[in-house]
Image: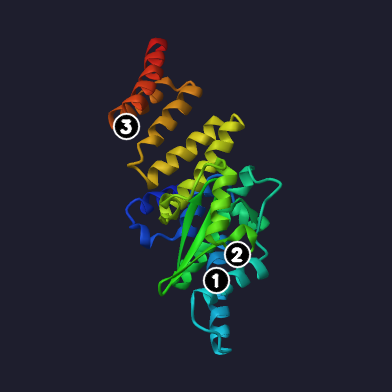
Amino acid sequence: MDADAKAIESLKQYAGVSDKDIDLGGLALAMVALDHDGISVDRYVRHFQKMSDEARGRYDVLICDGAQDDAGLRLAALKYTLSDIHDYRVDDIRHEALESADIMRVIDRAKGCSSALCLLYIDVARKAGWLVEGLNFPNLFLCRLEYEGVRLIFDPSQQCKVLEAHELRAIVKNALGEQAELSTDYYDGLGAREIVIHLCNHLKHRRIAMGDYCNALNMVLRMRMIVPDEYRLLLDAGVLCARLNRSKDAVEYLNEYITQAPDVYDRQEAELLLDELLRDL
């Protein structure tokens, strides 16, 4: 089996895996492996495991030194590993670039967008047996670590700074305006698939902005492999096929989207595009 076929088969296997059992780092790697011809993901897989082992090792050392076994200790072990040892930082200069969301390039450069950094922390924590979830705040991805009823929301892009309610409120207001307030929706922990899809959407949008509709479509099709019930990806696929002059494929995707979309307005918008495509066939 060649590398491309292996990567595709890996993605298909994730479709049937329960969210809690997903290898988060492995899935993120599988989503971008096809974009890196001739480069094996094996060393990146080992890197994820190495960081988890280092975090667990740091935790054990701190326990042996008499530290209190609490949520803060686990966060300290994560910060020591990813921020202090491996020097992972947010990419302030090229935050919107492809390489800031491509997990292989993020590892190569030790820099990435906030959602990529969060994915690294969450994967390392999961492999160490700790509960860390992603939180999708406006314009910023954060992490929440939980242990024995204590929850710490921290920002990997600020070297794991723990954020209090007033700081979270400021994030929302800075992004949405002074009238905006904290919503309970912001505290909903994201599953492994949601985190990877969030990162892949970043890659998709960057490809579209570059006019690279072919690779944007490829990313959409990969996303469909792991979230086949996400009907909105059908619209993405239809629009991108239309831009690539693949009208028959576009019609097929749009018809399927119209069948599945629950909102009448969304269906009407898709029907307008579909009518235009059918006239051109």
Comes first in the chain, label 1 or label 3: 1
Q: CA distance from mark 3 to mark 2?
A: 39 Å
Residue 137 in the image, given as x and y percentages of width and height: 51, 50
Q: CA distance from mark 1 to mark 3?
A: 41 Å
The residue tagged 2 is 160
| Observer able to see residue 119 | no
97 left or right of 278? right
Comes first in the chain, label 1 or label 2: 1
Quarter occupied by the C terminus: top left
Dot in front, 3 or 2: 2
Farthest top residue in view: 279
Q: Residue at x 67, y 51 (%)?
A: 91
Label 3 environment density (alpha carbons within 10 Å; few <14, some 14–19, many ≥20) = some
The local secondary structure at tag 1 comes to: helix
Q: Vertically, is 202 above or below 168?
A: above
| Observer able to see residue 46 | yes
Amino acid at dot 2: Cys
Closest to the observer, 199 or 70: 70
The residue tagged 1 is 75
Question: Could you tell me if the residues under marks 1 and 2 are in contact, i.e. CB atoms within 8 Å?
Answer: yes
The residue tagged 3 is 261
